[in-house]
Amino acid sequence: MALSVAIESPLQDEVRALVSELNAHLLSLTPPEFCFHLSVEELAEPDCTLWVCREHGEAVACGAMRRHGKRIGEVKRMYTRPEWRGQGIARRILGEMVDKAMNEGIETLVLETGDRHPDAWALYEKAGFTRCGPVLDYPNSEFSVFYHKQLAA
């Protein structure tokens, strides 16, 4: 397996396809009003960085970090195609994200995920994230689970 993970532009057809698959998956589990998606156009803004994992050139997974000021980064758009799950790809993307956040001096990473995403919970908890109350401006909802990870004091 020749997997590579790199920062890429979200404005590519392959990335649009990944994000579309992710949106469909999330909307199958969560009411639309509680899905807080970033579009690929929003992912292309200067406050976001997107990582794409490829196998022999094919985009198989992605994840993004959105900055909220200089101290807080938000994990967004984590997705691995079903046939690629269980191979540590999301863990690798998340690791790259944590490294970049630390290098930029970001103090805390936060995220919102759904109440029906136990695989996501396991990923974040193994990476040192802990559950918390609502983060940023997300509403407190039965459909959301929130996490944070302190990177610096």
Image (cartoon, helix red, strand yellow):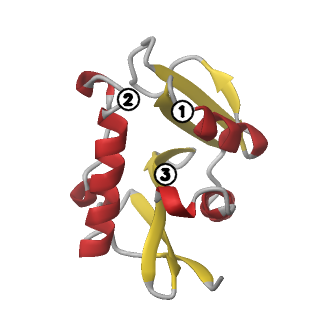
Which of label 3 and label 2 is nearer to you? Answer: 2
Check disc 3 and report its element: helix, strand or loop.
strand
151 displayed left or right of 101: right
**What residue do we see at 38% from left, 16% from top?**
139
Of callouts 1 and 2, the N-terminal one: 2
Of callouts 3 and 1, the N-terminal one: 3
Q: Amino acid at mark 3?
A: Met
Say if mark 1 contacts mark 2, CB within 8 Å: yes
Image location (x, y in percent) of residue 52: 47, 70
Separation (CA) of disc 3 from disc 2: 15 Å
Q: Amino acid at mark 1?
A: His
Check disc 2 and report its element: helix, strand or loop.
loop
Relative depth, front residue between 105 and 86: 86
Tell me if residue 141 comes above or below residue 28 in the rendering: above
**What residue do we see at 73% from left, 37% from top?**
125
Q: Amino acid at mark 2?
A: Leu
**What residue do we see at 66% from left, 56% from top?**
86
Q: Tell me if residue 24 can be seen.
A: yes
The C terminus lies in quadrant:
top right
Image location (x, y in percent) of residue 41: 22, 59
Separation (CA) of disc 1 from disc 2: 9 Å
Name the residue tied to disc 3.
Answer: 78
Which of label 3 and label 1 is nearer to you? Answer: 1
Q: How many marks?
A: 3
Residue 117 - label: 1
Where residue 150 sits, quadrant-wise, is top right
Residue 29 - label: 2
Q: Tell me if residue 44 can be seen.
A: no
Tell me if residue 59 comes above or below residue 112 in the rendering: below
Q: Residues within 10 Å of mark 1 (few under 14, many from 20)?
A: few
57 displayed left or right of 147: left
Tell me if residue 63 comes above or below residue 5 in the rendering: above
